[in-house]
Amino acid sequence: MNDKLIIAGKSYSSRLLVGTGKYKDFTETRTALDASGTEIVTVAIRRVNLGQNANEPNLLDTVPPSKFTYLPNTAGCYSADDAVRTLRLARELLDGHSLVKLEVLGDPQSLYPNVIETIAAAKTLVADGFQVMVYTSDDPIIAKQLEDIGCAAIMPLASLIGSGMGILNPWNLQLILDRVSVPVIVDAGVGTASDAAIAMELGCDGVLMNTAIAGAQNPVLMASAMKQAVEAGRSAFLAGRMPKKLYSASPSSPTAGIIAPTRS
Amino acid sequence: MITVSINGEPRQFSQPISVTAFIEAMGYSGKRIALERNGEIIPRSTFATAQLNDGDKLEIVVAVGGG
Protein backbone atom coordinates (compact mmCIF):
# COMPACT_ATOMS: atom_id res chain seq x y z
CA MET A 1 0.00 0.00 0.00
CA ASN A 2 1.32 3.42 -0.91
CA ASP A 3 0.78 5.34 2.28
CA LYS A 4 3.57 7.85 2.64
CA LEU A 5 3.95 10.64 5.13
CA ILE A 6 4.64 13.80 3.15
CA ILE A 7 6.27 16.73 4.94
CA ALA A 8 7.30 19.86 3.04
CA GLY A 9 7.14 17.96 -0.25
CA LYS A 10 9.35 15.05 0.83
CA SER A 11 7.86 11.61 1.42
CA TYR A 12 8.70 9.22 4.23
CA SER A 13 7.74 5.57 4.74
CA SER A 14 7.91 5.71 8.54
CA ARG A 15 5.44 7.75 10.56
CA LEU A 16 7.52 7.49 13.71
CA LEU A 17 9.86 10.38 14.47
CA VAL A 18 12.40 9.77 17.21
CA GLY A 19 14.49 11.99 19.45
CA THR A 20 18.17 11.26 20.02
CA GLY A 21 18.45 12.40 23.66
CA LYS A 22 18.84 10.49 26.92
CA TYR A 23 20.33 7.25 25.57
CA LYS A 24 23.14 5.46 27.41
CA ASP A 25 25.57 6.09 24.56
CA PHE A 26 25.66 6.72 20.81
CA THR A 27 25.65 2.97 20.08
CA GLU A 28 22.37 2.52 21.93
CA THR A 29 21.00 5.61 20.19
CA ARG A 30 21.74 4.17 16.77
CA THR A 31 20.52 0.66 17.60
CA ALA A 32 17.23 2.04 18.93
CA LEU A 33 16.78 4.32 15.91
CA ASP A 34 17.33 1.37 13.58
CA ALA A 35 14.84 -0.78 15.54
CA SER A 36 12.25 2.01 15.36
CA GLY A 37 12.50 2.23 11.58
CA THR A 38 12.47 6.01 11.87
CA GLU A 39 13.65 8.25 9.05
CA ILE A 40 13.42 11.59 10.87
CA VAL A 41 15.40 12.24 14.06
CA THR A 42 15.45 15.30 16.26
CA VAL A 43 18.72 16.75 17.53
CA ALA A 44 19.53 19.63 19.86
CA ILE A 45 21.96 22.47 19.24
CA ARG A 46 24.31 23.18 22.13
CA ARG A 47 27.50 25.05 22.92
CA VAL A 48 30.68 23.01 22.50
CA ASN A 49 32.39 22.10 25.77
CA LEU A 50 35.45 24.31 25.55
CA GLY A 51 37.47 22.35 28.10
CA GLN A 52 36.93 19.01 26.39
CA ASN A 53 38.78 17.18 23.70
CA ALA A 54 37.57 18.38 20.32
CA ASN A 55 37.98 14.81 19.02
CA GLU A 56 35.37 13.23 21.27
CA PRO A 57 32.69 11.18 19.47
CA ASN A 58 30.09 13.22 17.62
CA LEU A 59 26.42 12.38 17.16
CA LEU A 60 26.75 13.11 13.45
CA ASP A 61 29.21 10.23 13.07
CA THR A 62 26.89 7.65 14.68
CA VAL A 63 23.65 8.99 13.27
CA PRO A 64 24.78 10.26 9.88
CA PRO A 65 22.63 12.91 8.17
CA SER A 66 23.08 10.89 4.98
CA LYS A 67 20.94 8.10 6.49
CA PHE A 68 18.50 10.08 8.63
CA THR A 69 16.65 13.34 8.03
CA TYR A 70 17.76 15.67 10.80
CA LEU A 71 15.24 17.76 12.61
CA PRO A 72 17.20 20.27 14.71
CA ASN A 73 15.11 21.52 17.59
CA THR A 74 14.99 24.59 19.81
CA ALA A 75 14.58 22.70 23.07
CA GLY A 76 15.42 24.92 26.02
CA CYS A 77 14.49 28.16 24.24
CA TYR A 78 12.07 30.43 26.11
CA SER A 79 11.88 33.29 23.60
CA ALA A 80 11.21 33.62 19.88
CA ASP A 81 14.58 35.34 19.38
CA ASP A 82 16.55 32.51 20.99
CA ALA A 83 14.66 29.91 18.96
CA VAL A 84 15.31 31.75 15.70
CA ARG A 85 19.03 32.18 16.50
CA THR A 86 19.33 28.50 17.42
CA LEU A 87 17.78 27.36 14.14
CA ARG A 88 19.93 29.71 12.08
CA LEU A 89 22.96 28.12 13.76
CA ALA A 90 21.49 24.69 12.97
CA ARG A 91 21.02 25.59 9.32
CA GLU A 92 24.65 26.72 9.12
CA LEU A 93 25.80 23.60 10.97
CA LEU A 94 23.85 21.28 8.66
CA ASP A 95 24.84 22.86 5.34
CA GLY A 96 21.68 24.81 4.66
CA HIS A 97 19.23 22.17 5.92
CA SER A 98 15.92 23.98 6.41
CA LEU A 99 13.53 21.41 7.96
CA VAL A 100 13.38 22.23 11.67
CA LYS A 101 11.42 21.63 14.85
CA LEU A 102 10.36 24.84 16.54
CA GLU A 103 9.51 24.74 20.22
CA VAL A 104 9.39 27.77 22.48
CA LEU A 105 8.78 26.82 26.05
CA GLY A 106 6.82 28.63 28.73
CA ASP A 107 8.40 27.41 31.95
CA PRO A 108 10.94 24.78 32.99
CA GLN A 109 8.55 22.87 35.27
CA SER A 110 5.86 22.11 32.70
CA LEU A 111 7.88 22.63 29.48
CA TYR A 112 4.50 23.76 28.19
CA PRO A 113 4.73 25.71 24.93
CA ASN A 114 4.53 29.49 24.98
CA VAL A 115 2.26 29.84 21.97
CA ILE A 116 2.66 33.63 21.69
CA GLU A 117 6.44 33.35 21.31
CA THR A 118 5.98 30.24 19.16
CA ILE A 119 3.79 32.12 16.70
CA ALA A 120 6.26 35.04 16.55
CA ALA A 121 9.17 32.67 15.88
CA ALA A 122 7.19 30.71 13.29
CA LYS A 123 6.48 33.89 11.31
CA THR A 124 10.16 34.88 11.29
CA LEU A 125 11.37 31.38 10.37
CA VAL A 126 8.85 30.84 7.57
CA ALA A 127 9.77 34.25 6.11
CA ASP A 128 13.44 33.22 6.33
CA GLY A 129 12.85 30.09 4.24
CA PHE A 130 12.66 27.46 6.98
CA GLN A 131 10.28 24.51 6.81
CA VAL A 132 8.88 24.61 10.29
CA MET A 133 7.46 21.65 12.17
CA VAL A 134 6.03 23.27 15.23
CA TYR A 135 5.53 21.94 18.75
CA THR A 136 2.43 23.51 20.25
CA SER A 137 -0.39 23.06 22.72
CA ASP A 138 -3.43 21.04 21.70
CA ASP A 139 -5.41 24.24 21.08
CA PRO A 140 -7.13 23.85 17.69
CA ILE A 141 -7.29 27.60 17.05
CA ILE A 142 -3.55 28.06 17.60
CA ALA A 143 -2.88 24.99 15.47
CA LYS A 144 -4.85 26.50 12.59
CA GLN A 145 -3.04 29.84 12.99
CA LEU A 146 0.32 28.07 12.81
CA GLU A 147 -0.79 26.34 9.62
CA ASP A 148 -1.92 29.67 8.16
CA ILE A 149 1.50 31.17 8.94
CA GLY A 150 2.97 28.45 6.72
CA CYS A 151 4.24 25.78 9.09
CA ALA A 152 4.99 22.43 7.43
CA ALA A 153 3.56 20.32 10.24
CA ILE A 154 1.63 20.94 13.43
CA MET A 155 2.91 18.98 16.43
CA PRO A 156 0.56 19.20 19.41
CA LEU A 157 1.48 17.70 22.75
CA ALA A 158 -0.51 14.70 23.97
CA SER A 159 0.68 15.40 27.52
CA LEU A 160 3.73 17.10 29.03
CA ILE A 161 7.19 16.51 27.52
CA GLY A 162 8.85 13.48 29.10
CA SER A 163 5.82 12.69 31.26
CA GLY A 164 4.74 9.48 29.55
CA MET A 165 1.16 10.23 30.55
CA GLY A 166 -0.22 9.35 27.14
CA ILE A 167 -3.04 10.90 25.10
CA LEU A 168 -4.83 13.03 27.70
CA ASN A 169 -7.21 14.87 25.41
CA PRO A 170 -8.06 12.94 22.25
CA TRP A 171 -10.96 15.33 21.63
CA ASN A 172 -8.64 18.30 21.16
CA LEU A 173 -6.43 16.27 18.83
CA GLN A 174 -9.56 15.45 16.85
CA LEU A 175 -10.51 19.14 16.69
CA ILE A 176 -7.03 19.91 15.31
CA LEU A 177 -7.26 17.07 12.78
CA ASP A 178 -10.62 18.43 11.62
CA ARG A 179 -9.15 21.89 10.94
CA VAL A 180 -5.58 21.43 9.78
CA SER A 181 -4.52 20.04 6.41
CA VAL A 182 -0.74 19.87 6.88
CA PRO A 183 0.52 16.79 8.75
CA VAL A 184 -0.44 16.61 12.43
CA ILE A 185 2.17 14.81 14.49
CA VAL A 186 1.71 14.08 18.18
CA ASP A 187 4.83 15.37 19.90
CA ALA A 188 5.34 14.72 23.58
CA GLY A 189 3.61 12.65 26.20
CA VAL A 190 3.57 9.20 24.62
CA GLY A 191 4.61 6.65 27.23
CA THR A 192 4.04 3.24 25.73
CA ALA A 193 2.99 1.50 22.55
CA SER A 194 -0.78 1.80 23.07
CA ASP A 195 -0.43 5.60 23.37
CA ALA A 196 1.23 5.73 19.96
CA ALA A 197 -1.44 3.44 18.51
CA ILE A 198 -4.24 5.63 19.89
CA ALA A 199 -2.69 8.75 18.33
CA MET A 200 -2.50 7.02 14.96
CA GLU A 201 -6.03 5.56 15.25
CA LEU A 202 -7.33 9.10 15.76
CA GLY A 203 -5.90 9.94 12.36
CA CYS A 204 -2.71 11.71 13.34
CA ASP A 205 -0.12 11.60 10.57
CA GLY A 206 2.74 10.59 12.84
CA VAL A 207 4.14 10.46 16.35
CA LEU A 208 7.34 11.99 17.68
CA MET A 209 8.86 10.57 20.84
CA ASN A 210 12.12 10.42 22.74
CA THR A 211 11.76 9.53 26.42
CA ALA A 212 9.22 6.76 25.78
CA ILE A 213 12.01 4.88 24.00
CA ALA A 214 15.16 6.16 25.72
CA GLY A 215 13.57 5.92 29.17
CA ALA A 216 12.34 2.33 28.76
CA GLN A 217 14.16 -0.48 30.58
CA ASN A 218 15.03 -1.87 27.17
CA PRO A 219 15.07 1.04 24.72
CA VAL A 220 15.77 -1.07 21.65
CA LEU A 221 12.84 -3.41 22.32
CA MET A 222 10.58 -0.42 23.03
CA ALA A 223 11.71 1.19 19.76
CA SER A 224 10.57 -1.92 17.95
CA ALA A 225 7.26 -1.91 19.88
CA MET A 226 6.68 1.71 18.88
CA LYS A 227 7.34 0.91 15.24
CA GLN A 228 4.66 -1.80 15.34
CA ALA A 229 2.25 0.39 17.32
CA VAL A 230 2.48 3.26 14.86
CA GLU A 231 2.01 0.89 11.93
CA ALA A 232 -0.90 -0.91 13.62
CA GLY A 233 -2.59 2.35 14.58
CA ARG A 234 -2.20 3.74 11.08
CA SER A 235 -3.64 0.58 9.52
CA ALA A 236 -6.57 0.64 11.93
CA PHE A 237 -7.26 4.26 11.03
CA LEU A 238 -7.16 3.50 7.32
CA ALA A 239 -9.28 0.38 7.78
CA GLY A 240 -11.99 2.40 9.52
CA ARG A 241 -13.03 0.98 12.84
CA MET A 242 -16.46 -0.55 13.49
CA PRO A 243 -18.96 1.81 15.06
CA LYS A 244 -19.19 1.66 18.83
CA LYS A 245 -22.51 0.30 20.10
CA LEU A 246 -22.99 1.73 23.53
CA TYR A 247 -24.72 -0.59 26.00
CA SER A 248 -25.75 -3.11 23.33
CA ALA A 249 -24.01 -6.34 22.49
CA SER A 250 -24.07 -7.91 19.05
CA PRO A 251 -23.20 -11.62 18.73
CA SER A 252 -20.48 -12.60 16.29
CA SER A 253 -21.86 -16.13 15.82
CA PRO A 254 -25.12 -17.08 14.07
CA THR A 255 -28.15 -16.79 16.32
CA ALA A 256 -29.96 -19.56 14.42
CA GLY A 257 -29.30 -23.31 14.71
CA ILE A 258 -28.26 -23.42 18.34
CA ILE A 259 -28.82 -26.87 19.87
CA ALA A 260 -31.79 -27.39 22.18
CA PRO A 261 -31.21 -26.13 25.69
CA THR A 262 -30.82 -28.85 28.34
CA ARG A 263 -33.34 -27.26 30.68
CA SER A 264 -36.34 -25.41 29.34
CA MET B 1 45.64 42.24 22.63
CA ILE B 2 41.96 41.47 22.01
CA THR B 3 39.44 39.82 24.33
CA VAL B 4 36.55 37.83 22.91
CA SER B 5 33.83 35.94 24.73
CA ILE B 6 33.53 32.31 23.65
CA ASN B 7 30.39 30.58 24.90
CA GLY B 8 30.38 33.03 27.76
CA GLU B 9 34.06 32.61 28.69
CA PRO B 10 36.55 35.44 28.06
CA ARG B 11 39.57 34.47 25.96
CA GLN B 12 42.50 36.67 24.92
CA PHE B 13 44.46 36.72 21.68
CA SER B 14 47.61 38.72 21.07
CA GLN B 15 46.17 40.36 17.95
CA PRO B 16 43.02 40.38 15.77
CA ILE B 17 42.83 37.00 14.03
CA SER B 18 40.81 35.44 11.23
CA VAL B 19 38.00 33.06 12.10
CA THR B 20 39.91 30.25 10.38
CA ALA B 21 42.95 30.85 12.61
CA PHE B 22 40.70 31.07 15.63
CA ILE B 23 39.01 27.73 14.84
CA GLU B 24 42.41 26.15 14.36
CA ALA B 25 43.64 27.56 17.67
CA MET B 26 40.57 26.12 19.41
CA GLY B 27 41.11 22.67 17.89
CA TYR B 28 37.90 22.62 15.82
CA SER B 29 39.39 22.51 12.32
CA GLY B 30 37.36 20.12 10.16
CA LYS B 31 34.73 19.65 12.89
CA ARG B 32 31.00 20.13 12.40
CA ILE B 33 30.48 23.38 14.25
CA ALA B 34 28.59 26.60 13.62
CA LEU B 35 29.55 30.08 14.77
CA GLU B 36 27.53 33.08 15.78
CA ARG B 37 29.07 36.48 16.49
CA ASN B 38 27.09 39.14 18.37
CA GLY B 39 23.84 37.40 17.41
CA GLU B 40 24.66 36.95 13.71
CA ILE B 41 25.79 33.77 11.92
CA ILE B 42 29.33 33.75 10.56
CA PRO B 43 28.89 31.73 7.35
CA ARG B 44 31.49 29.01 6.86
CA SER B 45 32.29 30.50 3.44
CA THR B 46 33.60 33.65 5.14
CA PHE B 47 35.76 32.00 7.81
CA ALA B 48 38.99 32.76 5.93
CA THR B 49 38.29 36.47 5.55
CA ALA B 50 36.25 37.31 8.66
CA GLN B 51 38.28 38.82 11.51
CA LEU B 52 37.55 38.56 15.21
CA ASN B 53 37.50 41.92 16.94
CA ASP B 54 37.93 43.02 20.50
CA GLY B 55 34.72 42.55 22.46
CA ASP B 56 33.12 40.05 20.06
CA LYS B 57 30.70 37.65 21.68
CA LEU B 58 30.95 34.24 20.01
CA GLU B 59 28.79 31.16 20.30
CA ILE B 60 30.20 27.88 19.00
CA VAL B 61 27.67 25.07 18.75
CA VAL B 62 27.38 21.43 17.73
CA ALA B 63 24.51 19.00 17.26
CA VAL B 64 23.88 16.80 20.30
CA GLY B 65 21.27 14.22 21.23
CA GLY B 66 17.89 15.77 21.95
CA GLY B 67 14.16 15.28 21.60
Image (cartoon, helix red, strand yellow):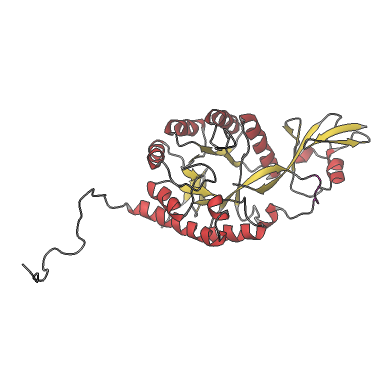
Whole-percent x and y of residue A134? 53, 38
Identified at 54% across, 56% down, the residue is A216
Whole-percent x and y of residue A205? 45, 47
Q: Which residue is nearer to you in this view: B15 or A159?
A: A159
Left or right: A160, with B23 as reference point:
left
Q: Which residues are magenta?
A: A50-54
Q: Which residue is nearer to you in this view: A82 or A129?
A: A82
Residue at the extreme front: A263
Identified at 93% across, 34% down, the residue is B15
Whole-percent x and y of residue A135? 53, 39
Q: Which residue is nearer to you in this view: B48 or A245?
A: A245
Predominant SS of the magenta segment: loop
Magenta-span inclusion, residue A7: no
Compared to residue A30, the image places residue A77 above or below, namely above
Identified at 53% across, 58% down, the residue is A36
Compared to residue A52, the image places residue A173 above or below, namely above
Q: How many marks?
A: 0
Name the quadrant containing residue A78.
top right
Name the quadrant containing residue A104.
top right
Which quarter shows the N terminus of chain A? bottom left
Q: Is residue B52 visible?
A: no
Q: Is residue A109 visible?
A: yes
Left or right: A213, with B52 as reference point:
left
Whole-percent x and y of residue A170? 39, 42
Which quarter shows the C terminus of chain A? bottom left
